[in-house]
Amino acid sequence: MHGQRNLILGKVKMAPKITLSDYAKIIRLQNLEEIRLLAEKLQGKTVKMVNSTAVGGGVAEMLHRTVPLFNELGLNVKWEVIKGSGSFFNVTKSFHNALHGKEEEISDEMLKVYQEANEENAKEMSFDEEFIVIHDPQPAALIRAKEKSSAKWIWRCHIDTSHPQPRIWDFLVKYINKYDASIFSAPSFAKELPIPQYMIYPAIDPFAEKNRELSEKEINSVLDKFGIPNDKPIVTQISRFDYLKDPLGVLETYHLVKRSTDCRFIYAGGTASDDPESAKVLHELQDKASQEKDFHILLLPPFSDFEVNAIQRASSIILQKSLREGFGLTVTEALWKAKPVVAMAVGGIPLQIIHNFTGILVHSIEGAAYQIRYLLNNPKVAKMLGEYGKEHVREKFLLTRNLRNYLLLLVTLEHPGENIIQI
Amino acid sequence: MKEKIAKEPFRFYTSSLLVEITGKIAYHLKDFIKILKEIDVSSIFYHIHHALREYSFAPGQYSNDFARWAEEGLEEGSLAERLASINIRDFTDLEALRAKLVEIVEDHLKKAVEIRKAAPGREFYFLRNIEIITPTPYEVQTLKEFTSALDRVGMRSLYYHFFDARLRLGRKTNDFSDWIQHSLGEEEMARKIDNLDPYFITMDQLKYKIIAICMGKEI
């Protein structure tokens, strides 16, 4: 293939350090102590994380935070990034879409580009560690280096592979089956594989710009910036302009709610450069909502994490009216801000929202509108849902839980075949 | 008064669960019961128990995964109520618990006029867990040391000794009562702790009730 001769492996520069003591202010101290107890049993263990980008995207964000925490705990964890040409990343983008179920033409030439890029990377890399964790499909074919390595190899799949295009899945599964274990984010994302499949939920970083605590001043500055008066309750959906996020359904929900309860709606999100449909969706929504002074459409540029955070925190209710969803981390982020969330029961959302307990699950526009009206008129119930939702995230969907699960996985791989492991 | 020294020290342990996806999926109750009869008992343990560990901040709001699926996935209200009312403290082995679950579902199926299929995306995914047990630094020999350590250990440790113990010991008690009775000879105190109903209080409340009993306070 072309453009693959000058591969330089990325040694990743880490983000500003957040230490475990920072998390001690957020999670139960005992939970932190338990993480330390587990880590004591893994002192000095060498681990290599491998993914395809050092910046941008949830995986890189997560690795920036967790790798230093693993090392603080006494493990020896490195993170390396594979390199590839533009054509390689175009191919892996097509793979990504096809694994999500989108129709993609995957040619033999594309498969060859993928294989060759992985081979080139494998030549440049060493795999002397005790555990190798490969993130997502881009570097999955590095497994061919397993023959020369004594490490346990783990494939961590961050994407929703519940309805993949068979051609791409059949191609990748030949590599995946060679791993010692795999990790999926939800049971429905997993497939029938001959290797163990563990479930580790995605996690959010409470210290990230998108999630950190904000002052009233900061929140109001964002509302001012977008010209949104803070004079009535705000209902917000944060999503890309994508039909699968049902922006027109959000507008219909707004119409139903507004008949009886005064409020504002915000639909805020970006358009994806690799999704030509998003501009069309945005224009259609703008056109249909053009007469609605209380329906605000915000086209956010990339890196608008602070604005997203402020808009979520300014809202009385967060809506997620998606018709299809992956894990739905925007829901996790809203729950962490103790916001009552009304969301469709799709994808990973029911894992996060237990109906009438940590939020409200709905199945239709009418259901969403009814529940929003109910919560706007019953702030005590809304508050309770928000508080329980936040506790749910604190327990299950913060980075520290992710850290714990990785430690458990490493221990488990050192005790193959045991259901109860005493260490 | 001199504090009583236990015949054997008590070591606090903690346990964590790594969740494994079994790949077994039920789309309706007939699938469900077939898998339920065959699945590894660690799957039954996981689906019945994990809510107690995960949702201790809001006790009683979530019973177990089987009941939740019957309610939300199948909209089978009466089955959900029966599954939710299973008192896991009545069971000292997982096979007996499996038999009870099978009995409830089979009884429901006998009376069912239709076999409802779960909506797409609301199928039941059987998971199982691997339990990793770790000793904590806390080893105690007196009641005073015990209450002080209990105050400091995490929820998972409390869970391990109070709930898990029944299955581990195969008898209807918990580790704390077992130690207090047999190593300290405090039979009445052990009985009071064992009689606590932990299902509708938070783990923190449970912890403080145990401490109060140990300190001879009324609860």
Image (tube, coloured by chain):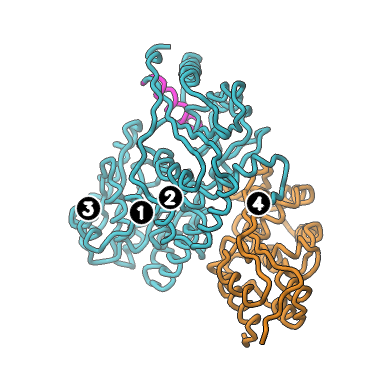
Chain colours: A cyan, B orange
Q: Chain of mark 1?
A: A
**Left or right of A394, for residue A420:** right
Residue A130 appears in view: yes
Q: Residue at x 80, y 63 (%)?
A: B170
**Segment colored magenta:** A86-102
Any mark on residue A204, and which? Answer: 2
Q: Nearer the viewer, mark 3 or mark 2?
A: 2
Are discs 4 and 1 less than 8 Å apart at CB?
no
Residue B106 appears in view: no
Residue at numbered disc 1: A211
Specify the quadrant that holds the N terminus of chain A.
Answer: top left
CA separation in Å, label 3 and label 1: 33 Å
Are discs 3 and 1 less than 8 Å apart at CB?
no
In the structure shown, which secondary structural element does the residue marked by tag 4 occupy? strand
Q: Residue at x 28, y 47 (%)?
A: A288
Any mark on residue B132, and which? Answer: 4
- Residue B168 belongs to the span the image colors magenta: no
Q: Camera-side residue: A220 or A80?
A: A80
In the structure shown, which secondary structural element does the residue marked by tag 3 occupy? loop
Task: Please determine whether, in this image, residue A302 is positioned above or below residue A114.
Answer: below
CA separation in Å, label 4 and label 2: 24 Å
Marks 4 and 2: same chain? no
Estimate the x, y position of residue A357 in percent, counting from the top left: 51, 65
CA separation in Å, label 3 and label 2: 37 Å
CA separation in Å, label 4 and label 1: 31 Å
Q: Camera-side residue: A110 or A62?
A: A62
In the structure shown, which secondary structural element does the residue marked by tag 1 occupy? loop
Q: Chain of mark 2?
A: A
Residue at numbered disc 3: A291
